[in-house]
Amino acid sequence: MRYAILGDIHSNLEALRAVLDALDQVPFGALLCTGDLVGYGAAPREVLRLVRDLQPTVLVGGNHDWAAAGRLPLEYFNPFARDAILWTRKVLDRVDLDFLGRHPALATHDGVTVSHGTIHDPEAFDYLQSAYDAHLSFSQLRTPYAFVGHSHVPVTFRSGAAVTYLLGDVIELGDAAQAVMNVGSVGQPRDEDPRAAFGVFDDETRVLEVHRVEYDVEAAVARIREAGLPDFLGERLRIGR
Ligand code: ZN
């Protein structure tokens, strides 16, 4: 089975369209979404419509999705994120907000676990970004493979006597019994590469490809400015931070 993995789209329609165009060239059998469809960006309605049309095999809720739906308190967020969540609530209708609030923070499907934050405490929405975080998550992981989001930085952790991590565009899992993979962010990359990120994983070859695609960053920045959202949310897209 080949899986396509998308996460942290964050209401960035231009980035999502570019990723979907790229995915047209890559056959896959299942689509996994690691959460945060909304927040930060200025096209939540359009992004929700596209994602619903895709009918993902697995879709989990991210902290921004849950906050927009009123399922997570706003104190949890920095002021820029809070502004964007309040704006998102204003522009979405009840049906969209209910959709954002009804997906669990972690879901399992056919040997694959999908979570926005950590596996060991998904509803806390902590980042899974160190070998120690991964060690805690492996202790609770009941499937060979897991996909997480939230940090917006691609990284893969492999289980073993000591947890190891791998960076790069092509990740080979080798003989590791389990792996937790983060393919990066579609709509707000934070690894200093502004291109949109998505992943393709083949569970027969056990290889993860992290793809990066250029998109119309300036159109997304202009949309954020026109919506009256903080300029910083546009500026960070240009530098991938
Ligand atoms: Zn996010």
Image (spheres, rainbow, N blue to C red):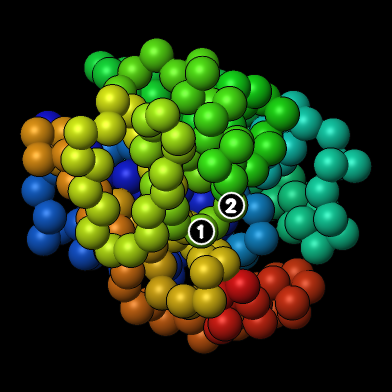
Callout 1 secondary element: loop
Q: Residue furthest front?
A: 161
Q: Amino acid at mark 2?
A: Ser
Residue designated by label 1: 153
Q: Name the residue carrying label 2.
A: 151
Q: Residue sitting at 67 percent across and 35 percent down? A: 125
Residues packed near mark 1 inside 10 Å, few (<14), some (14 to 19) or many (20 plus): many
From the viewer's perspective, is residue 19 above or below residue 36?
A: below
Q: Quadrant of the C terminus?
A: bottom right
Quadrant showing the N terminus? top left
Q: Secondary structure at mark 2?
A: loop
Q: Can you tell me whether the CB of the residue at mark 1 lies under 8 Å from the nearest atom of ligand 1?
A: no
Residue at 84% x, 55% y: name it.
78
> Which residue is rendered at x = 84% and y = 42% of the image?
76
Residue 109 lies left or right of residue 196; in this view the side is left
Check if mark 2's residue and mark 1's residue have beta carbons within 8 Å.
Answer: yes
The answer, for residue 125, to whether it is visible in the render is yes
Say which of 209 and 34 sits in front: 209
